[in-house]
Each structure stands twice: as structure tokens, then as C-alpha cells.
Amino acid sequence: MKNIKQLLKFMKGNAFTYFMAMTAVFFATVTSLLVPVVIRYVIDDLIGGKNADASSWLATMTGRSLLGACLVIIGLTLLRGIFIFLKGWASALASERIAKKIKDQIMNHLQHVRYDFYSSHDTGDLIQRATSDVETIRKFLAVQIVEVVNIFMMVGVIAYMMYGMSPKLTLVALSLIPIIVSFSFYFFFNIKNKFKVCDEAEGKLSSVLQENLNGIKVVKAFGREPYEIERFEEVNSDLRNKVQKLIQSFACYWSISDLMCFSQIALVIIFGSIWCYEGSLTIGVVFAFVTYEGMLLFPVRILGRVLSEFGKSLVSVERISEILDTAQDNEDDGHLEPVIKGNIEFKGVNFGYDENREILKDINFSIKAGETIGILGPTGSGKSTLAYLMTRLYETTSGTIEIDGIDVKQVKKQWLRKHIGLVLQETFLYAKSIQENISIKHEDVNTDQIQKAAKVATLHHNIMEFEEQYDTVVGEKGVSLSGGQRQRVAIARTIMAPMPVMIFDDSLSAVDTETDRMIRSSLKKSYGDTTTLIISHRINTLAETDRIMVLENGRITAFDTHDKLVAQEGLYKRIWEIQNLVGLEDLGA
């Protein structure tokens, strides 16, 4: 019932368009049902001379001639074609509007869900919900929902017209209809779960394919092609097997429903022939009944398909609703827009993805505005999590984070993120020009401002070597640039506007030591008053910061200057010795 209500909610605002479609269905049904009446008139009246009941009004329309009767049939067929066109146009118009509305809602919602939502959902599955599942709903609303109206109209009008010609043959003609309808509903309830299983399997296939294409460089570098092919074939075979079971269910339904439908026609022919032989019915009536029976059984026969498509649509509605029902990022938003200077304080902060996965434990520290803080720690120690908590991409499990003495939970998230620049290690660039990527957040900036940011990121000289310079298109995810160039584009993008707080999450890892030093020197010169956090595994990078925080197993084990940390036993000193003696600066990773 919940999914039906959601479907009706999607359809809201299209009542008039569907009314037009259903009106067209009504007239298309009436015109199609008048054709057997005309044929009966031709057989019984014009040819047989028995004065059929309808001959009075048909005589006027046909002029009591075969040519007139043919023209009437042609006219009715043309009218039916026009009404069918109107039905298709109106239902398609409504369904396309609804599909666009759903896609817009999904996209808007996905842009505002909490960041941790994506850690528990496969991207391929989300894409399928926004495309394949929406298409399933669109097809149902474009074709099947109007077909339901057609079925009820056909059954009602045909039964009425049959009864007017012969009540007893009408009982025979409708005798198996309840059984066929009951079987259709049984099929509907039986097939619904199979659709969901197939949808989930298709979503998994999409995820595997997307993951492979996104990581194709790694696949080729490590010779993983056979493994990836085998993995794809495995999920593809699983999808095939589940779809095959679904098709088998349809095959059983169609074969059994065909048997019952043809049995129904056979009963009409048998009893109609007997009563025609006895003289209680005319040949025209029997012919009309056989024609009506074929017209009646077709929509009844596809009732199971309509119901199965309805069930499939409800599954799609449920999958889409799971996205739309997800809490949005602004549901626990703050209300303040304070002037941010850059004083940061963590008070007893704990964080975990769940109660069994605690990442940060009792984190306490304070940073003064304008300080440059380095953060060192092994993989998984919680370095990046600190940055995500400051920008409220994640929310603390307990404890508070204050910026200039204000709890960040009281500050509007967009305001907070507007004043805290975060440069991630995993750089994402749009398939646009370098200039567009740098200015992506600031549409009103000029070329001089863009070039200034690129110079601070020590990227300008590289860009000027490209044939198209700042108009160079970087390709999907910046594939045409080196790793270091992509990171520097991301830095330039972040520093386009001065920010009181900037966080570099291992975002200099892909550049050489000299370039690293140049970037830090340029940043310090241009943004010396900014509170800066640098997460890195390079001691040379961290050594020039004011203080260095050492994280191990989610706890702060040291927080002091470089000179003091190298003078005491601990992780920092061990990595410093390794990198200085061996010269492998990234070994600490």
C-alpha cells in the first residue's frame, strides 16, 4: 500500500492528461466494438434478409448497401486509429513528465544525502535505480495503466452488447473469465519477488562493470584482466539464471492462460453452433460472439502481464523510495553563519561508523587561528576522518568540535564548507577545461584570478606548455593529466577564494619533494593567516609546520614540534629516521 501511495504521488499533477487518455480509450473501445455489430447486420440483414435488431439505425448509416456498410467499417476503423493515437500521445506525455520528475527528485536527493550514505551503497546500483527503475515505472504509466482502463471497459461494454444479443450465450462466453482473472492475480503475487531479485542482480552487474571501467588503469597495470572477466561472467551468469527463472514463470503463465482462453472460444463456437442449428440464434450473432470473444479475451489474457508489470513497477518504486526516504544532509543542519577566524578545538571527540568500528577515540586538541598543523599516522589511524568531521561530512559519535568557540553542529553546513577548504588525496576533475575545473565554484572570476591560483599551486608553467593552455580539456576524471598535475588543479580550485581554514588531505603525495616545497612556500606566502592542516606521510612536508599531531589506532599519541618529536621515541622518530637514512619518503605510508 505504501508503494502504491508513492506511485500516486509521482503521478500527481497529470490527472487531466490521463483523463484525456482514458477518454480516448473509451471512444476507441466503442468504435472497435461497433464493427462486429455492422458485420452482423451485413450477414443477417443485407445477405440473410432476417432483419437484425440493429438494422433500423444501421440501415440509415449504410443506406442498406454493402458499399455503405464497408464505408461505415472503414470510418469506424479510422476513428479508432485517431483515438488510439490520442491515447498514446496523452499517456506518453504524462509518463515522460513523471519520469523526468522522478529523475529530478532522485538527483536532487542524492546531492543532499549524508556523505556516509555512499559508503553503504554501490554507485552502479544507484545509477540503475535512477535509470532502469525509472524506465520501468515510465513504461507502466505509458502503457499498462491505460491498458487497465481498456480491460475494464472492454469487459463491461462487450458483456452488455453480448447480453443484448443472447443472454444464454453470454453466460457461456463469460464462464471461464473469473478463472482466468484469478489465475492472473495468482501470477502477479507469485512474480513480484522475482522481479526484485532480478533488479538487485542487475544492480550488482552494473556495479561490477562501473568499478572495472573506473579502475581500468589498475586492472591493466596488474594484469587483472582474466580475473575481472571471470568476476563479470560470474555476476552476469547469476543475472542470466535469475532472469531465466522469471522467463520460465512467464512461459507457464502464457501457456496456461492461452489454454483457458482458447477453451473459452471453443465453448462459444460449440454452443453457438448448436443453438444456431436449433434456430434459436442466427449465424450473424454467432459470428459477432466469436469476434467479441477474441476482443474480450485479449485484454483479459494480458491482465497477468499488466499485473506483473504493475508488480515490477512497485518493486522499482520501493527501490527509488529507499533513496528518497534517506535522511538528507540538511535535516540536522545548524542555523548560524558566524565570522570564521580559524580557531579549532576538539573536545572528547569519538567517532565510529557503527558500534563495532570505532575510528577515533577521545580526541582532544586545540589549534589557534593562523597555525599550520601537520598530521601523521599510519593508514586507518583516522587522519582523513578528522577532516571529514570538521566539515561535517561525518558527524561525531560523541564529544564536540568547536570553531571560534562555536559548536560546528550549530553552524550551517554549507557555510562551514564554504569557509573550510578541503583538498582530498583522491582528486576528482570534471571532463572540462583546466580553466573550468579551477573556477568550478566561482563562475564570476576572471582569467587573472584563475592564473593566480594556478601559480600558487605551481601549475601555471605546466599549463602554458599545453597546446590549448588553460582551455585544455582534461578528459574524464582528468585522465590526460599526471597525478601531480591533477592534485595541483584541485589545490588551485580550492584556493580560488581565501578561506580561514584549509585542509590538505595527503594532497601533495603525487608531486615530487621540490614541487611539494614550492607549493607550501607559495601557500604560506599568499595565505599566511590561514589555519592550515596538512595530512602527509612525508616528514620533510610536516617538519616546517608549527606543530605535528601523531595519530595511532584512533588516538593522539603525540602533538608537538618537529624538533621535540624527533628527540623522543615514537612513530614520528622512527619514520623520520627511515626517510632520512634510506631516503624513501613514502615508506611511512
Image (cartoon, rainbow, N blue to C red):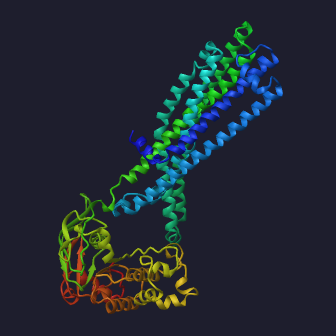
Q: Is residue 350 above or below residue 93?
A: below
Q: Nearer the viewer, residue 65 or 585?
A: 65
Q: Nearer the viewer, residue 42 or 278?
A: 42
Looking at the image, the residue that sits furthest to the top is 278
Q: Is residue 158 left or right of residue 400?
A: right
Quarter of the figure with the N terminus: top left
- In x, y percent, where is residue 428? 44, 73
- In x, y percent, where is residue 323? 40, 54
Residue 158, quarter of the rendered image: top right
- In x, y percent, where is residue 203? 48, 53
Q: Is residue 95 above or below residue 66?
A: below
Residue in the image at 55% along x and 51% along y: 96
- Count of numbered marks: 0
- Residue 330 makes an appearance in the image: yes
Q: Is residue 43 left or right of residue 21?
A: right
- In x, y percent, where is residue 298? 63, 30
Residue in the image at 78% along x and 19% along y: 43
Q: Is residue 41 above or below residue 446?
A: above
Residue 538, quarter of the rendered image: bottom left
Q: Is residue 36 left or right of residue 136?
A: right
- Residue 287 makes an appearance in the image: no
Q: Is residue 317 left or right of residue 533?
A: right
Residue 151, quarter of the rendered image: top right
Quarter of the figure with the C terminus: bottom left
Residue in the image at 43% along x and 58% along y: 122
